[in-house]
Image (cartoon, rainbow, N blue to C red):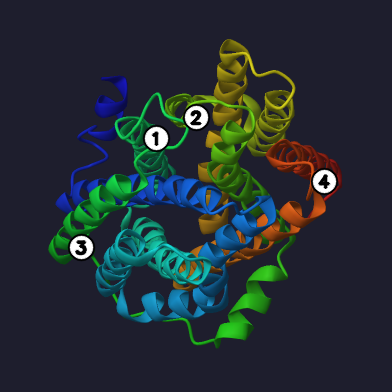
Amino acid sequence: MATIRFLLRPGILSSSWFFLLLAHTFILQGVIIMVRVATSYRAATFGLDEFWIGVIGGAFGFVPALFGLHLGNVMDRYGETKSLIAGSALIVLACLLFWLTADTLPVLLIASILLGLGQFICVAGQQSSVARAAPDGQRESYFGRLTVSVSLAQAVGPMVIGLFGRHQLVPDIDGIFLASSGTGVALLALSCLLRIPFNAAEGNRLGVWQTARFLLRDPAFLLSAIAGLVVFSAMDLLVIYLPLYGIERSIAAGTVGTLLALRATASILSRLMFSRLFSWFGRGRLLIFSMLLAGIAIVLLTVNENPIFMSAAMLATGFGLGIGGPLTLAWITEICPSNMRAAGVSLRLALNRVGQALLPIGVGGLVAGIGASGVLAVTGFSLLAMAAATTRYFSLPRR
C-alpha cells in the first residue's frame, strides 16, 4: 500500500500522461524479465554453457548500443510517442518469435536482438518523457516514481514465472513465452493511447558524434554514465545467470524466481527511501555506499546455498542496486543542457547496452569452466572496483 500511495501522490501525478507512462513501464519491465529468465532456461535445456548464455545476453544489448544516440537526437526533435509504439511492436514480434520458433541458437540470438532493441526504444522514450515533460523542481520525484514502477514489475515478474513450475528445476518455458506475447499486445495497445507533452521549438543542432563528445567531456557525466553501466550490468547478469546457478546447485525454479523478486522488492524499498537517503548522505557517499553494499552481497551470494542466507544477500543486493539507477539518471539530466536531455539519456542507455552486450560474453569467457558462481563473483567485484573509483572522484578537488 505504501508503494501505491507513493506512486499516486496527487501533487506528482497530476497529468494523465504520467499515469499511463507508469503503467507502460510496469508492463514493459514485467514482460522483459519473464522473457529473459525463460530464455536462460531455454538455452540451458539445449546444453549451452555460461559462455553461450552470455552471448545470448549480449545479443540483447548489442544493436541498441549502436543506435542509441541516434534515437536520442530523433526524440529531441520529434518527441517520444512514436518511439514507444515502435518499441512495443518490436517486443510483441520478439515474444512471438521466442514462442513459435526459439528452438535453435540462431533463433534465440535473433529474438534476443529484437527484444533488446524494442526494450531500449521504450525505456529511452519513457526516461526522455520524464526528463522533458516533468515540471521543473520535480524531476527527481518523477524519476523516483518511474524507477519504483520498474522495481515493482521486476518483483512481480519472477513470481509469475513460479506459476509455470514452482517446484520444477525448469519451468514451462513455452507457457511463459505465450503469456509474454499476450502481455506484449497489451503494451502495444497502451502505447497507442499515450500522448507525451512535447515542444519542438528548441532543438539540438549538433550532430550525433558531436553531441556524444560534448557530453563525454564532462567528468561528472562520464562518471555517472559508467557507474550506471556497472549497476545496470549487475542487475542484468543476475537475471541471466541466477537461473543457471540454480540448475548447477539444484535450486528449484520457484526459489530462483523468489530470489529475483526479493531483489526487486528491496529495490522498491530503497527507492521509496531515496529522497531521505539523498538528504542524509549526499550524492557521492550514497552512490559509494550503494555499490559497496551490492558488491559485497553478490559475492556472499555464492558462498552459501542456504535459502535464508541467499534471501538476505539478495535483499542487500536489491537495496544497493535500487539506489544506483535513479541516482545516476537524475544526475545526468541535471548535467545535460535542456535541448540535449533525450540525447543524454539515450547515450547513458547506449553505454549501458555496451556493457550489457560485452560483459556477459567477457565474464562468461573469463570464468569458463568455473560456472555461474564465477560470473556472480566477478559481478560483485566489479561493483566494489567502481565504488573505489567513485571514492577517488569525489575526494579530488573539482571546479
Q: How many marks?
A: 4
Q: Nearer the viewer, mark 2 or mark 1?
A: 2
- Horizontally, residue 363 falls left or right of residue 184, namely right
Q: Nearer the viewer, mark 3 or mark 2?
A: 2
* Residue indicated by mark 4: 389
Residue 328 percent coordinates (x, y): 58, 48
Q: Secondary structure at mark 3?
A: helix
Closer to the N terminus: mark 2 or mark 4? 2
Separation of disc 2 and disc 4 at Cα?
A: 32 Å
Closer to the N terminus: mark 1 or mark 4? 1
| Amino acid type, mark 1 | Pro
| Amino acid type, mark 4 | Ala
* Residue indicated by mark 1: 158
Q: Are marks 3 and 2 in contact (CB under 8 Å)?
A: no
| Residue 188: assigned label | 3
Q: Are marks 2 and 1 in contact (CB under 8 Å)?
A: yes
Residue 77 percent coordinates (x, y): 36, 81
| Residue 268: assigned label | none
